[in-house]
Amino acid sequence: MTTTPEPATGRKPRPTRHRGPVMLRGGEPDPRTQGTTTDARLLDRRGPTDWVHTDPWRVLRIQSEFVEGFGLLAELPRAVSVFGSARTPRDHPHYESGVRIGAALADAGYAVITGGGPGAMEAANRGASEAGGLSVGLGIELPFEQELNEWVDVGIAFRYFFVRKTMFVKYAQAFVILPGGFGTLDELFEALTLVQTRKVTRFPVVLFGSEYWTGLVDWIRGTMVPAATIRESDLDLFTVTDDVDEVVRVIQEAEAGRVAGDAGGGMRSLPVDTAPSDA
């Protein structure tokens, strides 16, 4: 068991322990696992390792990531995934918005799931943690080292983006999208595609920060709709707001709608789209 280094914020370090790829902070460790490894690297047999990088064996590695993720998150309470830029500095208004959103979601009884990185992700995790909520980080292996941020209570680091994306969707009731870059846009449009094609029961996708998102929304409305690459009704698949209270309200209304049997998840009513999809 290790201790997280003293953070820049002066927050008291919390004990950190690892269970395979899973990172846990706070609470007492399980005494049954103290001082053990994964069977000492399976009896510490050494030799050529090229075989572990062949495609058939990658299938088992992929399978193990799904099993680990499902096992860790299966008993997660109702949750909301929050996305945003890893480059957002702590003194930026977008960071403050992330903290407020994380706290408001925690106060409303939702766990907060992020990519576990710095910037806007850290902000949402921080807000949830400081408000006494559950703060979850789903990290990803990158060419450069990136630790899960200090506000993550339960975390796991994935090798494969597609496994990680499954966890974001499967265990969330809504997506909140803070200003971000390519990775944030990737999550946004994947979510909209899943909702549009009804691969998931419709749930809210909320874009927070109208000044940042207006240009994109105007392009979707002014270019994609006239080109008939999407329907005008697809604009109802997301909400743009600058109001933290509205974020929570939209999510709660969607949840109430689902409980009442509304297949639209409480969002604006949409006609069934039988046209071909780009998915």
Image: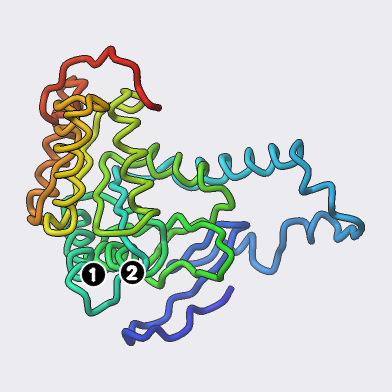
- Classify 31 as above or below 170: below
Task: Name the amino acid, label 2.
Answer: Gly
| SS type, badge 2 | loop
Location of residue 223 in the rendering, given as x and y in whole percent from the top left corner: 20, 36
Q: Quadrant of residue 134?
A: bottom left
Residue 193 to residue 78: above or below: above
Q: CA distance from mark 2 to mark 1?
A: 7 Å
| Chosen colour scheme | rainbow
How many numbered marks, from 0 up? 2
For numbered disc 1, what is the local secondary structure?
helix
Report which residue position mark 1 lands on.
95
Of 89 and 109, the residue lying toward us: 89
What amino acid type should be assigned to the residue bearing mark 1? Tyr
- Residue 232, given in percent of the width and then of the height, sits at 14, 27
Badge 2 vs badge 1, beta-carbon distance below 8 Å: yes
Q: In which quadrant of the rendered view does residue 77 lie?
A: top left
- Judging depth in this view, the residue of 34 and 212 nearest the camera is 212
Q: Position of residue 179 (x, y in %)?
A: 25, 59
On-image quarter of the N terminus: bottom right
- In the image, residue 180 sits, relative to residue 12, either above or below, namely above
Q: Residue furthest top?
A: 274
Front residue of 266 and 106: 266
Say left or right for 73 vs 276.
right
Instruction: Pinpoint residue 164: horizontal percent, then vertical percent.
Output: 48, 46
Q: Residue under circle 2?
A: 119
Q: Name the residue at 25% across, 51% down.
A: 177
